[in-house]
Image: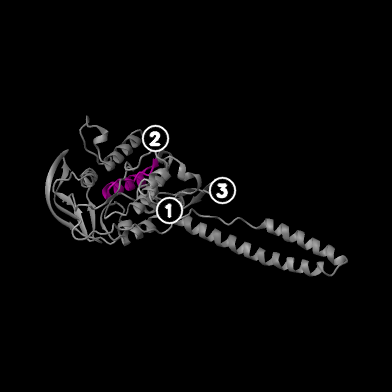
């Protein structure tokens, strides 16, 4: 049903992120529920897995509620949208897909702005007339008072124009200074086939401004390869001495969940003032007292944004990104893609989101499945 083949006695923690996602889907579907609840089901799934899940949901005859930051995935099978408004704290129901929702919201905002503009014009006219009559004295002062009261009622009639979720500010990940030449060399690597490591030859060399896209099916060993590169334990791969590595892990295990956001950021930027750190965090929508919250209490999306903020402060020479779109609001993705596209160091990227990858210049592709 979810295309997952494994020994029955295999430990779950030994599965890759994509394989665990397939296993979670299987455990939900096998119960044959009347209501199927899926929270970010495409995270970590490869292209084949997403396609398989999409087709399953298209054919699914019972009720399904899905949370996802992949609009194209949602639009393939949904008949309506429940929109949680972060400002009004109300749940709004719309028919159609997410793109229909965006069109409807945009039209609603335009109507509200037009109504408010018309009211503002009439209100100003009444205020101007009220001021004119007030200086005339006598009965006209009473007329002026009535006009002011009408203007105040019309002020109350103005509608609160709908606000949308904020998008993170554009940012830059600075490249480590003083590095040049070859940053990473890979002559061989290992993949996982039938639960065994199989060595394969390669000829990969990365310098500044060069990007490598790592692809392959779930369970082939992409995350394992990235971990071994970062730790310096990868056989057949060598990172140049003194190159600083910035590693974005899909499970956020590079973050200490007991640290506050401020502590986490200040650990990689001891020379920055609190004001500077707070300003950077605000650009990633970590504002107010949230910066003093523990990492473990944040949503997965917020952990992702903290991880990007740390990369800005780390100024790496080699950037390694493992599924950096997981849990991230798709409003932020173009901003993140732009930052990665402008990054001037060497970069290795793993992502199962083609539209995201398409916004980043890729110089070489290493397919572990071949």
Circle 2 packing at 10 Å, graded few (<14), some (14-19), many (20+), is few
Q: Which mark is residue 280?
A: 1
- Residue 50 magenta: yes
Find residue 158 and report its horizontal and vertical position in percent: 65, 58
Which is nearer the eye, 83 or 320? 320
Q: Earlier in the sequence, mark 1 or mark 3?
A: 3
Name, please, the residue furthest toward the right.
Answer: 138
Q: Earlier in the sequence, mark 2 or mark 1?
A: 2
The magenta span reads 38-60
Find residue 50 and report its horizontal and vertical position in percent: 31, 48
Q: Tell me the distance, in whole angstroms, between the alpha carbons under discs 2 and 3.
A: 32 Å
Q: Tell me the distance, in whole angstroms, between the alpha carbons under discs 2 and 1.
A: 45 Å
- Secondary structure beneath label 2: loop
Find residue 93 and report its horizontal and vertical position in percent: 51, 48
* Colour mode of the rendering: one colour
Q: Which mark is residue 33?
A: 2
Q: Quadrant of residue 60?
A: top left
Of the two numbered discs 2 and 3 in the rendering, the one whose residue sits closer to the viewer: 3
Does residue 200 appear left or right of residue 139 in this picture? Answer: left
Q: Which residue is mark 3?
A: 88
Which is nearer the eye, 84 or 170? 170
């Amino acid at each position: 049903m979810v295309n997952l083949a494994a020994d029955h006695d295999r430990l779950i923690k030994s599965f890759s992120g994509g394989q665990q996602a397939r296993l979670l889907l299987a455990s939900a579907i096998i119960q044959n529920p009347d209501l199927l609840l899926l929270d970010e089901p495409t995270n970590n799934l490869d292209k084949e897995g997403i396609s398989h899940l999409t087709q399953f949901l298209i054919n699914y005859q019972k009720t399904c509620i899905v949370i996802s930051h992949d609009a194209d995935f949602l639009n393939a099978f949904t008949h309506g949208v429940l929109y949680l408004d972060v400002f009004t704290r109300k749940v709004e129901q719309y028919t159609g897909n997410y793109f229909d929702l965006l069109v409807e919201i945009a039209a609603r905002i335009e109507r509200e702005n037009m109504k408010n503009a018309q009211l503002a014009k009439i209100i100003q006219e009444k205020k101007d007339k009220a001021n004119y009559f007030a200086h005339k004295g006598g009965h006209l002062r009473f007329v002026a008072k009535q006009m002011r009261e009408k203007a105040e009622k019309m002020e109350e009639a103005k509608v609160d124009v709908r606000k949308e979720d904020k998008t993170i500010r554009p940012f830059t990940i600075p490249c480590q200074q003083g590095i040049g030449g070859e940053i990473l060399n890979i002559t061989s690597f290992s993949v996982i086939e039938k639960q065994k490591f199989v060595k394969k030859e390669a000829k990969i060399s990365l310098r500044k401004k060069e990007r490598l896209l790592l692809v392959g099916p779930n369970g082939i060993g992409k995350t394992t390869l990235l971990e071994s590169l970062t730790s310096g334990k990868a056989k057949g791969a060598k990172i140049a001495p003194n190159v600083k590595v910035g590693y974005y892990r899909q499970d956020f295990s590079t973050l200490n969940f007991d640290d506050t956001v401020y502590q986490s950021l200040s650990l990689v930027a001891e020379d920055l003032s609190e004001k500077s750190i707070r300003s950077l965090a605000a650009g990633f929508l970590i504002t107010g007292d949230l910066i003093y919250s523990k990492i473990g209490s944040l949503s997965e999306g917020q952990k992702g944004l903290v991880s990007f903020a740390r990369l800005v402060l780390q100024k790496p020479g080699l950037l390694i990104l493992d599924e950096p779109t997981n849990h991230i609001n798709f409003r932020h993705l173009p901003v993140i893609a732009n930052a990665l596209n402008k990054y001037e160091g060497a970069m290795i990227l793993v992502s199962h989101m083609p539209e995201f990858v398409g916004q980043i210049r890729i110089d070489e592709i290493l397919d572990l499945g071949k």
